[in-house]
Amino acid sequence: MTRSDPVRVLMLGWEYPPRFVGGLGKASQGIACGLADLGAEVLFVLPRFESRSEGARLQVSGAREWLLEHGGNPRVAEGTRRPRWLGVAAQLQPYARPSVEPVRGVGAGTPGDAAALYGSDLGREVARFAERVAAVSDRAGIDLVHAHDWMTFPAAIAVADRHQLPLFLHVHSTEYDRSGDGANPGIVAIERMACERASHVFAVSDYTRGILVSRYGIDPAKVSVVYNAPDADELPPATAPESGARQPWVVFLGRLTFQKGPDHFLRAAAEVAQLDPAARFLICGSGDMLDVLKQQAQALGIAERVEFRGFLTPGAVDRLLAQSSLLVMPSVSEPFGLVALEALRAGTPVVLSRQSGVREVLGHSLQVDFWDHEKLADQILAVLRLPVLARQLVEEGRAQLARLSWDESAQRIVDAYASVAGLDVAGAAAT
C-alpha cells in the first residue's frame, strides 16, 4: 500500500554552504536537495557554533533554507520540496585533531553517556549534539535517519534507537584517510561501531568502500557506492585551455594536511621548476602543515616560485581555476575529490592521485601514485608543454562529468531506502 504522506528524512551533518571547509558541505547540499527533488521531506540538522574563533561559526541560512531556534516547531512551507534546516548549539569542528578515547559501546537512547565513553572536550560536544538532536527528533515525525561522517554518528544512533528507525550512514572520509597510521583509535572505534549498527552504509567511492570492508570489517553487502557529482550551476561551460591563454600556474587546492599530500606536490614542483622556468606553483588552503610547507619550499630552493594563497572563497576558487593551467591532486588517501570536478568544469586539466575515489569516474585523466614525484613531475610538464594534451584531457573529462549528477546520486540513495527499509520515496511523492 502506497503511503499518502512524504517520506521524512532526518539528515545530520556539520557543514553546509555557505559555511563549509571542504567538499563535504557541497556534497551535503547536493544530496539533500537531490532527495528533496525526488519527493523526500528532509530536515537537515547541523551544529551552530557558539565559539567566536575565526572560522568556527557554522550556520545555515539563505532564501530557501530556514534556520529555526532549538525548541521550535520545524515546519515546511506549503508546496515546497526544499530541505528545511535546524541549527543545534554545539562546537563540532570537523578537521580538529581531537583526543578521543576508544568507544566501548553506546546505550540505546542514552546519548548522555557519550561524554563518558569518548572523553575530552570534543567528546562532550559530540554528546551535546546527540542530546539536542534526540530532543528535536521527538517532534520531527521522521521515518529514517541519514548521517554524514563520524561526528554525527553517535547522534544518529541515539535517534535511531530512541524511535526504532532505520539508520543510514554516509561515509565521506574515514579516520584512516585523514591520519594514516596515526589514526585515532577512538574515532576508528566510533566509525566501526556505527557502521556495524547501521541499516545501510553509503560510501562515496569504491575506494572508500574497500577501506570500510578491509579495515573496519564491515559486511560488503551493506555498503553501496554513491558518487559525488558536479554542481551544474557552479560555472558556465568553459573552453579548454589554449596555448598562452592561461597563466603557467600549477595549483594545489585543499586542506594543508597529511591526507591531501601538499608535501608531495612541493617535491614534484621542485623537479618541474628545474625544467620549466615559467611555471609557478600555487598552494591554496589552510591547515596544520602550513609552516612546514613554507620551510620545505625554502629547503627545496623554490620558495620564490611558490605562492601560498590561504583559504579561498568559492568565487575565488572559480576565478583561480579559470586562469590556471593545471590542478594537481596528490592526495595520500582521497575518498573522492570534488575539486577535480570543479577544475574540469572550469576547463582546467587535472592530474590525480591513484589513491583517490574520483579517478573511478574520470578514467581518462592523468593518474599517478602520490609518492612517485618523478612521474608526477613528468605529467605536469607534459600538460604545460602540450596544449593539445591539455585540451584533450578537458574534453574527455567533461564528457565523463556529463554522466554524473546529484539527481542520479539521490536516486541511488532512494533505491536503498526502499530495498533496505521499505520506504518508497517516489511512491509517496506521487500520491
Image (spheres, grey):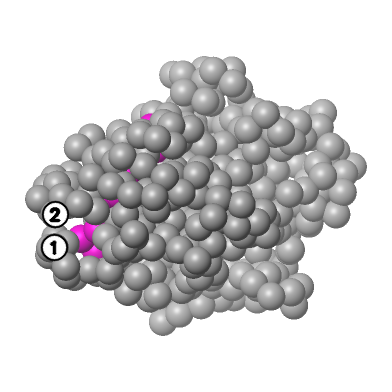
Residues under labels 1 and 2: Cα distance? 6 Å
Res 225 label: none
3 and 414: which one is in front?
414
Q: Residues within 10 Å of mark 1 (few under 14, many from 20)?
A: some
Answer above or below: position of 36 versus 426: below
Image: magenta residue range? 345-354
Q: Is residue 127 visible?
A: no
265 and 233: which one is in front?
265
Answer above or below: position of 248 versus 207: below
22 and 48: which one is in front?
22
Q: Residues within 10 Å of mark 2 (few under 14, many from 20)?
A: some
332 and 402: which one is in front?
332
Q: Earlier in the sequence, mark 1 or mark 2?
A: 1
Answer above or below: position of 204 versus 4: above
Quarter of the rendering occupied by the C terminus: bottom left
Q: Which residue is mark 1?
A: 243
Q: Which residue occupies 29% across, 41% down?
A: 379
User: Mark 2: which amino acid?
Assistant: Pro
Does dot 2 land on a helix, a strand or a loop? helix
User: Mark 1: which amino acid?
Assistant: Ser
Q: Is residue 321 visible?
A: yes
Q: Which residue is mark 2?
A: 387
1 and 2 marks in contact (CB < 8 Å): yes
Query: Residue 17: percent from the left, percent from the top?
Result: 47, 68
In the displayed structure image, the side of residue 251 where residue 201 appears, left or right: right
Report if residue 291 lies within the magenta region: no
